[in-house]
Image (cartoon, rainbow, N blue to C red):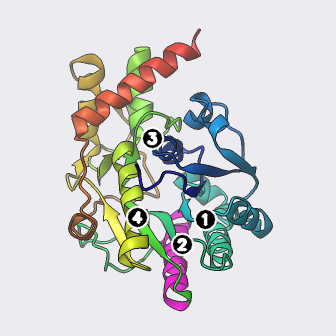
């Protein structure tokens, strides 16, 4: 029987890309799942799959402490996956206050409510990002790298991590931080991102557009690997006393945007269709990629989805989704 069977788990950001697949995995493992949901998005995989009918939904805003406290205490949650955040870099630039409220205030609300649980909460995983490290010439990022976010989104992730570490150090809250690169997979409907945007264009017979010059280097990791990473980390927080630690999760195989585009084109079309390169990307860090050796050594976690396999799974999801959308 799974260690998650019968356990009460809260997922914030449950309608997002990772949240939707994490909820499904937890349900498969027999957990009792609660989801804090700001807006009911009918296009979310959580809703589309009807998994939302199998969870206890708490409607409300992370920036409201009363709502967050109710979400933590209502179903006596033991484990919390804090994925809820404003995740779009461009949106953060246009509306930094709302981003700070969601990402920073939302995090301290969640951690404070967990602290007030009379130690019922045994494990908290805070989903962070490589953006927390900011810009650096020292690559790959390792967990002891300074947190130097500059733009509003990056700063919100740096602050999130520092607040989580503060609660671990000061109050002994069992919390750990997961820092990931670019996560892709079925269910991401932010078409401005390279993977869903390129797949949609190719399936529609359109010429895909690259906003950058194609040389920006990133990590790309499939959502199934990240779901597995979060679950590994939550178990380790409870069992290994890794309170306050951060872990990078990556395939350790960075590649540039053009190479990723070519891989997507091969999977969708069987050949490479030349994209239209705009070279207008701004407010983006040129190169970012992670070293996940700490996660391999301390958590015994390894990526199991290579790029071709991950793209095959992802393209199949979009073929189905987009064909259903035109019916």
Instruction: Name the element at disc 3.
Output: loop
- Does the CB distance between marks 1 and 2 fall below 8 Å? yes
Query: Does residue 236 show up magenta in the picture?
Result: no
Q: Earlier in the sequence, mark 1 or mark 2?
A: 1
Q: Name the magenta segment's main secondary structure.
A: helix
Quarter location, residue 55? top right
Instruction: Name the element at disc 2.
Output: helix
Q: Nearer the viewer, residue 80 or 184?
A: 80
Q: Percent x, y for residue 64? A: 77, 65
Q: Percent x, y for residue 261? A: 29, 34
Q: Residue at x 58, y 71 (%)?
A: 121
Residue 132 vs residue 270: left or right?
A: right
- Does the CB distance between marks 2 and 3 fall below 8 Å? no
Query: How many neighbours does mark 1 have within 10 angstroms: few (below 14), some (14-19), or many (20 or more)?
Result: many
Tell which tag, 1 or 4, sits nearer the viewer. Answer: 4
Q: Percent x, y for residue 83? A: 54, 57
Query: How many neighbours does mark 2 have within 10 angstroms: few (below 14), some (14-19), or many (20 or more)?
Result: many
Instruction: Name the element at disc 1.
Output: helix
Q: Earlier in the sequence, mark 1 or mark 4?
A: 1
The residue range painted magenta reads: 149-170
Q: Is residue 134 visible?
A: no
Residue under pointer 1: 103
Q: Residue at x 77, y 62 (%)?
A: 67
Quarter location, residue 12? bottom right
> Which residue is farthest right?
66
Residue under pointer 2: 160
Q: Is residue 21 visible?
A: yes
Residue under pointer 3: 193
Query: How many neighbours does mark 4 have within 10 angstroms: few (below 14), some (14-19), or many (20 or more)?
Result: some
Residue under pointer 4: 235
């Amino acid at each position: 029987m799974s260690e998650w069977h019968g356990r009460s788990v809260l997922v914030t950001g449950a309608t997002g890309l990772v949240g939707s697949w994490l909820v499904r995995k937890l349900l498969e493992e027999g957990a009792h799942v609660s989801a804090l949901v700001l807006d009911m998005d009918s296009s979310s995989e959580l809703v589309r799959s009807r998994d939302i009918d199998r969870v206890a939904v708490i409607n409300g805003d992370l920036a409201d402490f009363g709502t967050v406290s109710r979400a933590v205490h209502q179903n006596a949650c033991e484990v919390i996956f804090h994925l809820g955040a404003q995740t779009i870099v461009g949106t953060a630039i246009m509306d930094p206050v709302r981003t700070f409220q969601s990402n920073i205030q939302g995090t301290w609300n969640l951690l404070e409510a967990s602290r007030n649980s009379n130690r019922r909460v045994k494990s908290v995983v805070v989903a962070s990002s490589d953006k927390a490290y900011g810009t650096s010439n020292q690559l790959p990022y390792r967990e002891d790298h300074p947190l130097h976010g500059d733009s509003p989104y990056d700063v919100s992730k740096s602050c999130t991590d520092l607040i989580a570490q503060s609660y671990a150090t000061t109050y002994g809250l069992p919390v750990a931080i997961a820092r990931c690169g670019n996560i892709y997979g079925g269910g991401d409907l932010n078409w401005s991102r390279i993977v869903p945007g390129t797949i949609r264009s190719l399936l529609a017979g359109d010429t895909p557009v690259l906003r950058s010059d194609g040389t920006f280097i990133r990590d790309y990791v499939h959502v199934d690997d990240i779901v597995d990473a979060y679950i590994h980390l939550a178990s380790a927080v409870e069992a290994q006393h890794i309170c306050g630690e951060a872990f990078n999760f990556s395939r350790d195989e960075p590649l540039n945007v053009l190479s990723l585009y070519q891989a997507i084109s091969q999977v969708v079309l069987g050949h490479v269709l030349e994209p239209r390169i705009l070279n207008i990307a701004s407010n983006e860090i040129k190169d970012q990629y992670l070293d996940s050796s700490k996660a391999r050594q301390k958590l015994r976690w390894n990526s199991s989805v290579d790029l071709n396999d991950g793209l095959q799974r992802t393209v199949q999801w979009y073929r189905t989704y987009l064909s259903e959308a035109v019916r």
